[in-house]
Amino acid sequence: MKKRILTGDRPSGRLHLGHFVGSLANRVKLQEEYEQFILIADVQALTDNFSNPQIVADSVRELVLDYVASGIDPQKSTIVVQSKIPAIAELTVFYMNLVSLNRVLRNPTVKTEIEQKGFGESVPAGFAMYPVSQAADITAFDADLVPVGDDQLPMIEQTREIVRKFNSLYGTVLKEPEALMSDFPRLVGLDGKSKMSKSLNNCIYLADRAEEVEKKVMSMYTDPSRLKPTDAGTVEGNPVFVYHDAFNPNKEEVEDLKNRYRMGQVGDVEVKQKLVLAINNFLEPMRIRRSELEKNPQKIDAILKEGVEKGNKVSEEILSKVKTAMKINYTFK
Ligand code: ATP
Ligand code: MG
């Protein structure tokens, strides 16, 4: 039997090239080898978008389009909407008794995010609890493995602690998941900032049209110390060349551009024009898959409906075992 893995995203906007190189590309590969569940974590997205639920609602179908465009095959991967899986919410409530408030607040991933989001003293309790709800996500689908980068390891550790605590109190019911460590590359932003990120507004989205890609690339940040094309330029860390390395399959062309750039024999315009072509070629098959699905919106609903049905089947079984172990699986005749 194939091992089961759980991945997912918070629906709060569209996915960009950073998401693709950082996780989607990996999932497209993983779906061949594993039974993959992909969770659209809308409940979790509300923990920091509670004042703007429309973004979350609108992003659910957008995510499905981004997934299918990226090469996720709904026949191979099960796409599940979190809010449609009541077992996750129930498990979260049960697990909250198995973890101390201090332990949750000391979670390094949560701590960093609380700082980044500037919550200060008014961290919503729901946000602080999201590692507990992730434990519910992972165990609800009985996942063996969770693909993570090293920054997410504390989340898996938290889940493992909850599972061990549960099993030692109530008997062995839950599976202790393992992290599937990957070396996730971080993609720089159009502005040269270390990370392409929605909130930094430095993204090429998977759904961008060819003209949008052209506009964005042509105004990209390059080497700030290079004033004219005849100046020697720096290739290392230059986002234009980072993107060439990531998206231009023509290695010879890339090497030639790099050499000429270093010697001051090529202008930014040529480097960028070739990059526009490379990124648009890279996105083209995604555009084709996206537009096919867009023409057929009931197919998106069918994918979600099927995913939710399958997700509920698996998670209800787990929940029932959990409740039996906790002696609250009453039946009243
Ligand atoms: P926000 O600005 O709202 O934080 P974002 O664009 O930074 O959004 P996230 O939702 O924070 O995206 O990212 C979720 C996950 O996607 C990350 O944990 C990471 O795995 C992956 N990811 C996001 N941005 C990048 C990037 N630039 N390079 C590689 N992976 C990325
Ligand atoms: Mg982010």
Image (tube, helix red, strand yellow):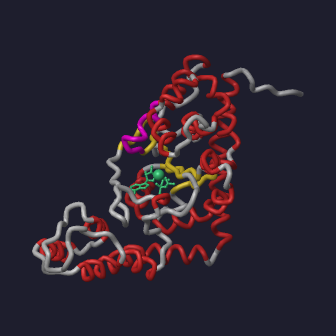
Above or below for 115 versus 8: above
Task: Give the image location of residue 93, x and y in percent.
Answer: 67, 31
Q: Is residue 155 magenta?
A: yes
Query: Toward the viewer: 330 or 181?
Result: 181
> Could you tell me residue 66's position as x and y percent?
52, 65
Residue sitting at 57 percent across and 22 percent down? Answer: 100
Which residue occupies the extreme left position in the image?
A: 263
102 shown above or below 138: above
Q: Position of residue 40 (x, y in %)?
A: 58, 53
Residue toward you, 199 or 185: 199
Residue 171 location (% of width, % of height): 59, 19
Rendered residue at 13%/72% (across/down): 232
Instruction: Check residue 193 for magenta coloring.
Output: no
Magenta stretch?
148-157
Task: Name the image quarter holding residue 333.
Answer: top right
Foreground: 14 or 105?
Answer: 105
Name the residue rendered at 20%, 62% in the picture: 236
